[in-house]
Amino acid sequence: MLDGWWQEQVAGGDARPLPAVYDPDLPDRAGSEPEQRQHHAVASPRNEWEQWWLYARGAARRFAQGISPPEIEVFGPVLAADEFGLLQADLSYSRLYAAGDGRYQKTGMLVVGRPAVMVGALAVSAAVNHRRKVAARRDAEQRWRDHQQIQVTMTNHRLLCNTLDAGFESYYYGGITEFYPDLDAWQLTLAFDGQVAPLRLAGPAVPALCLWTATAVLGDRWSRDSRLAKLLA
């Protein structure tokens, strides 16, 4: 039922509303109403989660038939001469890393006076050191950090993440060493070579990100990845 809509996108025509379809493979998401979780009835377009799911499934089928997606214009980051945009979307962003090595600075108090004063000072010093120790251990743990909502631009060369602190971060497909798409959780996790911390993106556009990242990283093998089977079902 997406044939006409997708053909218009390929031809560069104006987008029509997505058709209403019954999609039993639409993954559940947090906060779905019971009747939505049961029926997965996709409205036209009822919300961005379902719209992105429909886009990803239609794009996967068309790409398997040799039809590439339409290019989009990208403003802001400067692209290479042979680089073009595939999509832009707002997503949840986080990175996996340790913020410290477990070491901390102990505090020491030298107090001279009555025994009660000395005992109180030692108790305060012990409490401060305990808090610093706990914080240092927490910082040394590999945890998902830097949680924020960002705009992600996807091109045929890389993912561009516009973060609050660092601005645009580029993640080139050639540097990806591990690829973990999770359609049921609406998450994409990537690991990289070198000292680059793993990246996790989550949100409505994840099915499309999983699709295009798979085509870039896996090449022709993308359609045989069982983790993406729902897109071709």
Image (cartoon, rainbow, N blue to C red):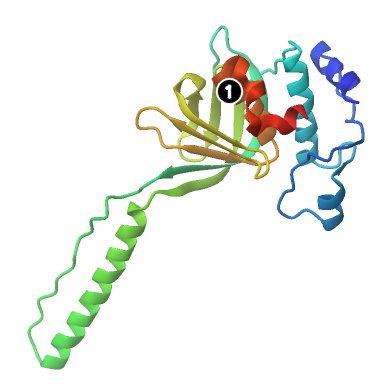
Visible in this render: residue 121?
yes
- The answer to whether residue 33 is above or below residue 54 is below
Which corner quadrant of the image does residue 76 belong to? top right
Q: Quadrant of the N terminus?
A: top right
Residue at image location 49% in from the left, 26% down from the top = 171
The location of residue 221, given as percent across then percent down, is 61, 19
- In this picture, residue 132 sits left or right of residue 226: left
Visible in this render: residue 75?
no
Secondary structure at badge 1 equals loop
How many C-alpha atoms fall within 10 Å of the one at disc 1: few (<14), some, or many (≥20)?
Answer: few
Q: Which residue is the site of mark 1?
A: 76
Residue at image location 45% in from the left, 23% down from the top = 175
Residue at image location 90% in from the left, 19% down from the top = 4
Residue at image location 20% in from the left, 86% down from the top = 120
- In this picture, residue 41 sits left or right of residue 150: right
Identity of the amino acid at label 1? Gly
The location of residue 109, given as percent across then percent down, is 14, 74
- In this picture, residue 138 sits left or right of residue 148: left
Which corner quadrant of the image does residue 148 belong to? top right
Q: Quadrant of the C terminus?
A: top right
Towards the viewer: 55 or 66: 66
